[in-house]
Amino acid sequence: MTYRIVHYINQFYAGIGGEEKADHKPELREGFVGPGMQIEKLFNGEGKVVGTVICGDGYYGEHTDQARTECLEMIKGLQPDILFAGPAFNAGRYGFACGDIAATVGEELNIPTVTAMYPENPGVELYSKKTFIAITSDSARGMAKAIPTMVGIGTKLLKGDKMGPARLEGYIHRGIRKSFFHEKSGAERAVEMLLAKLKGESFRTEYEMPVFNKIPPAAPVKDLKTATIALVSSGGIVPKGNPDHIRVSSAESFGSYDISELKNMTPENYESIHGGYDREWANVDPDVVLPLDVMRELEAEGVIGKIHPIFYTTTGTGTAVANSEKFGQEIGEELKKAGVDAAILTST
Amino acid sequence: MTREIERVAGIPVVQIATIVPIMLTVGTNRIVPGIAIPHPTGNPALGPEGDKAVRRELLLRSFKALTTPVTEQTIFEK
């Protein structure tokens, strides 16, 4: 059979124009245009570019909903087996458009989609999990290498061939881990990595750490004596009996509890449900994790204005970064609404 | 969680925890190193009085962190 290929490109690669033509509205042309010629050639008779959808990068970026809908309709009408988009190299708006249309087509038409970008293209962070993004150099000089990588990935997807790891196939990691049996145990592999590191040799981690954002520090509290301070904890301190069933690890929720009448945390009223540390001390006196008793004293002494009546808590072991961030955003919204001046967050 | 509260509420958040490198990694701006993982804000080994004294010192240091202007991630040591 001959695979029906549709290719998405911008106004520049279609030869329509540069920045002055970036508002070019979606247009469908029969057959290949620009880099699509090489795509078809590499399919060696097994595939044909049945149509090329062209859209200005500015138009896609500024009228995204409209551009997406129009392009999707055009692509759908061509009944493709696969969509290729780009390569976009390091062009940010083109990368966004390629990623967005590829992700949309994959989801709506349920066909494989492949695009290609430089790893720092902003389209990568947005769409790397929703399509296959072949890794390219930062400019069109890398075209000769980019197209064969895209076609290689696309062919595997079309034929249902086994897809190897991202670094070997040449696409950007999609955050998917596959289980398999290794001939060496984890301990052996870890020691080998450590030895390589000690020798200054290169080694490859089996578990990449997530990259966290940093933010500029907030301005300090001006007057502590009138400030309202909130208490927050990821140490698993909850009212006795854990009424909201916060999970002992990998938390998917946080609790908010009224402590306005509470002077001290005791084993009778509060406990720790955290599954990631020895709870012996916290369960004798929860103040060793959530320092309410001394906070009350400092409040009475007038060192601070007052303690915010609501205390926020969750379990911070095995908890997904995305969940932690979401909890922080929701707690942040509430503290903002309540006019709280600062927060103390304790973690175990 | 610390970072997102600070960002969304626009207020300073001081984190008291024991593993400082993790706080640096996740983007905490005001850091007060805790006593130990299972009891960051106390030291039961010192008895009730000593335990509370430790807690008081940590909280006063946290207040100092909250009232100090910082331009980057800062660790407030004893």
Image (cartoon, rainbow, N blue to C red):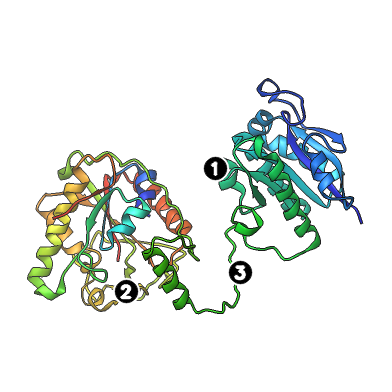
Q: Comparing marks 1 and 2, which lies closer to the viewer?
A: 1
The amino acid at mark 3 is Lys
Classify 10 Å Cα crowding around label 2: few (below 14), some (14-19), many (20 and above): some
Task: Name the spot of residue A68 as percent of width and height, x first.
Answer: 72, 39
Label 3 lies in what chain? A
Q: Secondary structure at mark 1?
A: loop
Label 2 lies in what chain? A
| Residue tagged 1 | A120
Q: Residue at x 48, y 76 (%)?
A: A186
Residue B39 makes an appearance in the image = yes
Q: Tell which circle, 3 or 2, labels the residue nearer the N-terminal end.
A: 3
Q: Tell which circle, 1 or 2, labels the residue nearer the N-terminal end.
A: 1
Q: Residue at x 68, y 29 (%)?
A: A59
Q: Are marks 3 and 1 in contact (CB under 8 Å)?
A: no
Task: Name the spot of residue B57 as percent of width and height, x first.
Answer: 12, 58
Q: Locate residue A180 relative to residue B70 in the image: left or right.
A: right
Label 1 lies in what chain? A
The amino acid at mark 2 is Tyr
Q: Are marks 1 and 2 in contact (CB under 8 Å)?
A: no
| Residue tagged 2 | A277
Classify 10 Å Cα crowding around label 3: few (below 14), some (14-19), many (20 and above): few
In this rendering, the answer to whether A36 lies above or below A256 is above
